[in-house]
Amino acid sequence: MYIKDFVKKLLPIQNLDNLYVVADFDRTITAGSSLTSWSVLADTNLVPEEYSIERHRLYEIYRPIEVNTSLPFKYRMKMMDEWFRAHIQLFVTYKMTEEAFEKAATDLRVMEFRTGAQEFLKFLYENHIPLIIISAGIGNFIEAFLKNYDCYFDNIYVSSNKVLFENGIAVGVGENVIHSFNKNEVSLPPKVKDKLKRRNQVLLLGDQTSDLNMVNKSLHDSVITIGFEPDDPNDPCNSLEDFQAGFDIVCEPHENYIDLKKILF
C-alpha cells in the first residue's frame, strides 16, 4: 500500500460515531475482475441478441468520448447522460423483465466481492457506521447482489440508476441518471442526511479518479480517500500518476479490504 506523507497521523480512525463511508460499487466493493453492473445482463442468455448488438454499438460510439480528455468537459457530461439514457431505453425497447434482472444478479460468475469486502460491510453495520453507495451502475443489480450475500444491511443507502418496472416489464429509469461525471450532484434523501449531519469524518472508497468528486471536502472536518488501483495499468481514465496524486491511500491490485481494515481501524 502507498500511504502519503502525513496521512498516518489521521489513522487509525478512533471515533466511529463521527464517521460515515461513501463508496463506489463496481470494482470498488466488487473485485477488479468483476463485470460492471451494466454488463451483467449481456453475459447471460436472458436477453435477445439484438440487445447485445445495440449495447455494443452504443459502447463504440460513446466510450471514446468518455475517455477523451481533450474534449470539453460539459460536452462529455452531456454525452454520458445521452449514452446512459440510450442504454436504459434498450431495456424498454426489448421488454426486459424484472425476473431476468433478478436471475442475472444471482450469477456468481459475473460479480464477486473484493477479498474481505463482506467482512468490511459487516464491520460497518455492527458499528452503526452509515454507508452511502454512489454508483453510476444499475441499482437493481447492486441491491440484488448485496441481498444474495446477506449484506444489504439497514445502514446502507444505494444511490444509483434504478430501472423501473410495470407489470414486470422495464419502463424506464427513476429520478436522475447517474454517470461517472456527475456523482458530485447526487442528492441524498432527508432521512439519510439526518443520519449524517452529526458525522464530520468521511471515508471515501473508489476505483476511478472521478470517484473523488463524490464528497465535497470543504464541507467536512476530515475526508480520507482510498483508491483501488485498476487492474489495467493502461486504463485511459486513470493514469497511475493521477491516481496516486488524487487518493490519500492507494491499494495495489493484490491488496484488499483485510489489509485496509488493519490500517484504518
Image (cartoon, rainbow, N blue to C red):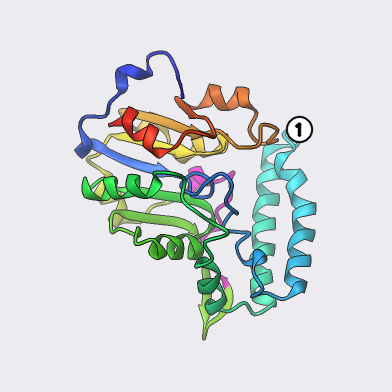
From the image, give the main secondary structure of the stretch colored magenta: loop
Residue occupying the point 58% across, 76% down: 170
The magenta span reads 172-186
Q: Which residue is mark 1?
A: 70
* Residue 162 in view here: no
Secondary structure found at label 1: loop
Q: Image check: 6 left or right of 82? A: left
Q: Position of residue 8 (x, y in %)?
A: 34, 18
State the residue in front, 92 or 197: 92
Residue 222 location, quadrant: top left
Q: Image check: 94 left or right of 185? A: right
* Residue 153 in view here: yes
Q: Is residue 231 magenta?
A: no
Category of crowding for the residue at label 1, using alpha-carbon neighbours closer than 10 angstroms: few (below 14), some (14–19), many (at least 20): few
Q: Position of residue 212 (x, y in %)?
A: 50, 35
Q: Residue furthest top?
A: 5
Q: Is residue 174 magenta?
A: yes
Residue occupying the point 47% across, 59% down: 142
